[in-house]
Structures are given as structure tokens and as C-alpha cells.
Image (spheres, helix red, strand yellow):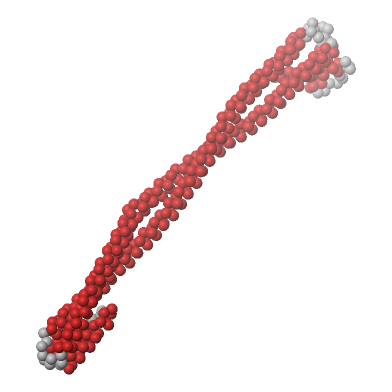
Amino acid sequence: MKSFILLGLLSLTFAVSISNQGTLTNPTSRVERIMTKFMQLSEMSTQFNFNKLFDAIDQLSAQLKQSEVDENNLFDADFAQYVEDQAFYTDLVTFYTAEVAQHTEDLRSLNNHLESYQQQLTQRQEELDKTQKQKAQLEETIRQNEITYNKQISDFNTAIDVLDQAIQLLSGLRNPVLIQTESDQLKTLANRLNSINLKNHRVLYQPIIDIFMQIAQNNLANQDLLKKVLSMLNGLRNSLDGGRNALTSNYNSERASNLELLETYNKKIDALVNEVIPMLQDLIANTIEQIKVKTELLNNAQANLDEAKETLQYIEDRWVKRKAQHAALLAEYEKEQALIAQTITVLQRGGVRRQ
């Protein structure tokens, strides 16, 4: 409507303007015909009252001024809303940025903890495997030691028993000439001693074996020789008895030490199997679950941050467009007001005035 009125005013202005130059001839176009009509009005300006025309022009100017005021008020309101929206979404961006950073840091910490727990679990499982192997080796050592000990104790017992029999046999000899039974008994005792595997004492009882065989073969045993042999037998028996006692003492001491170490292995295995490894497995499972939850929170925070940034950018872009629109409207209003002023001037110059 404003454009139509302004077109009319422009036409009127142009018509009045050219009326001072003469009347158009042969008007052919619609614009020329409108101009011709306005020129005729201008020529009749002394005959008609144009107050209504000037009132319409004043009304249009007032409407333009009011539109400009309304636009400025609306622009101020839009600016206030822009400031409010910008502050709100800027705060949101700041908040979600901090939230994303916090979740990212929490995830980094959780992943570090998870890696540490997994390394500890691997170490404890390797430690368990090593301890179980050590336990099996120690149990085998204890078993083999027991077999060896029982064999050595049996040899000591057999040797001492042979010596006791030999001492008893030689102590009862009164005739220097041996009978066949006594000779056979000495050979038997010599063979039994010879079959005993007591390496550390072999050097002690080997001479006894030789003397037994010599006496048995010669069937002779004088009292001086018997006394010497009995002295050697008693000395050897005491040595073997001491060796047996030392063997038992060493065996019991080593066995007690091994059993103590075995108990340590059992406790360690029990702690690893029933406490440490399950605890680490629970920590790993809980940390993985926390990572899942924290990852979801991070994704949500990142989505909220992206949306807040998008909205903030939209607000900024919308404000740029609004400022351009405002500037264009003010320029248009100014242009239209200038056109109205020009139109009035032209009209007045053409003789069209208020009455």
C-alpha cells in the first residue's frame, strides 16, 4: 500500500514537475496518461482544494515515522533477547565444555586404573603359576627326601644289626679254631656288610669285611685278634649309630624347614586364589562398567555441547541478519521520508498548496 501511494506521489511529483515545461502530447503509455492527469490537476490547482492530498501525505509520513519507531523498539527488544539468548547458550557451552573435559579426564583416569589392574592381575596369575610349580617341586623334594632317608635309615639299621650280630658272635668265641657254622656266619655277615651302601662309612667297615673273610677262610681267631676286631666293631657301631642319629636329625630339620616353606606356598596360593585375584577381577569388571557409564555420559555431554554451539551460532547468524534487516528498513524509511519531502516541495513549486 505504501509503495502504491509513493508511486502515486512520484507520478504526481513528476507530473507537476513537467507541467512547468508544457503539456505532453500524444500520451501513449499508462505512466504518461497518469502524468497527464496529474498535470491537469496541477493546472486546476487554483480551482480545487488539495488539503486532503496534503493530509494523506502527512498521514503517510506519520505512519512511516511510527513504523520507524516501532522498528527501533522491536530491534531493541530483539537485541535484548539476543543478549539474553547469547548469554544463556554461552553459559551452556561453557558448562558442557567443562563437563566434557571432566568426563574425558575421568575416562583417562579409569582407563589408567583398568590398565594397572589388568597388569596386576597378569602379574598375580604368573605369580600363582610360579608358586604352584614351586609347591609341586617342593612336594616332590619332600617325597624324594623321605624315600632317600628311609633307604639310608634302613641301611644304617641293617649295618648296626649286622655289627651287633658280629659282636655277639665274636664275643662268644672261645676256641681259636672255628667250627663250620661259625665260619659260615662270619661269611654271611661279611656279605651283608658288603651289600650295604653307606658311602661315607665304607672306609670304616671295609676292613671289618676283610677281617671277617680272613677269619672265616682260615678258621682261626686268636684272642688278641678277636679283641682288636671287637674294638673295631664297637667303634664302627658307635660311628654308624652317630651317623644314623645325625641323618635323622638333619632329615627332620630339613623336613621341618621344607614343610614350613610348603605352608608358606599354600598360604600364598590360597591368598592369590581366594582373595587377591578375585579382588582384581572385581575391580576390573567394576572399572569396565564405570568406563561404559562414563563413556555414555561423555557422549551425552558432547552431544549437548555440539547442540549448544549450533544454537549459539544460529543466534549469532540470526542477529547478523537482523542487524542487516534493521539497517535496510531504516534506510528505506529514510528514503521514503526524503521522497515525501521531495514530493511536497515539487507540489508546492507546481502551485499545489494547502488552502
Q: Measuring 23% from the left and 71% from the top, which residue is drawn there? A: 245
Q: Is residue 103 left or right of residue 206?
A: right
Q: Measuring 85% from the left and 13% from the top, which residue is drawn there? A: 349
Name, please, the residue furthest toward the bottom: 218
Could you tell me if residue 227 is visible in this image?
yes
Could you tell me if residue 8 is visible in this image?
no
Q: Is residue 120 left or right of residue 215?
A: right
Q: Measuring 20% from the left and 91% from the top, which residue is drawn there? A: 214
Q: Measuring 27% from the left and 69% from the top, which residue is drawn there? A: 250
Q: Is residue 112 above or below residue 90?
A: below
**Residue 83 falls in which quadrant of the image?**
top right
Foreground pick, 243 / 23: 243
Report the number of numbered marks: 0
Q: Quadrant of the N terminus?
A: top right
Foreground pick, 39 / 264: 264
Measured as percent of width and height from the top left, residue 217 is found at: 18, 93
Name, please, the residue furthest toward the front: 224
Measured as percent of width and height from the top left, residue 263 is found at: 29, 59
**Residue 247 falls in which quadrant of the image?**
bottom left
Measured as percent of width and height from the top left, residue 12 is found at: 80, 17
Q: Is residue 17 above or below residue 240?
A: above
Foreground pick, 282 / 143: 143
Q: Is residue 289 above or below residue 131?
A: above
Q: Is residue 289 above or below residue 36?
A: below
Foreground pick, 239 / 108: 239
Q: Quadrant of the C terminus?
A: top right
Measured as percent of width and height from the top left, residue 18 is found at: 86, 18
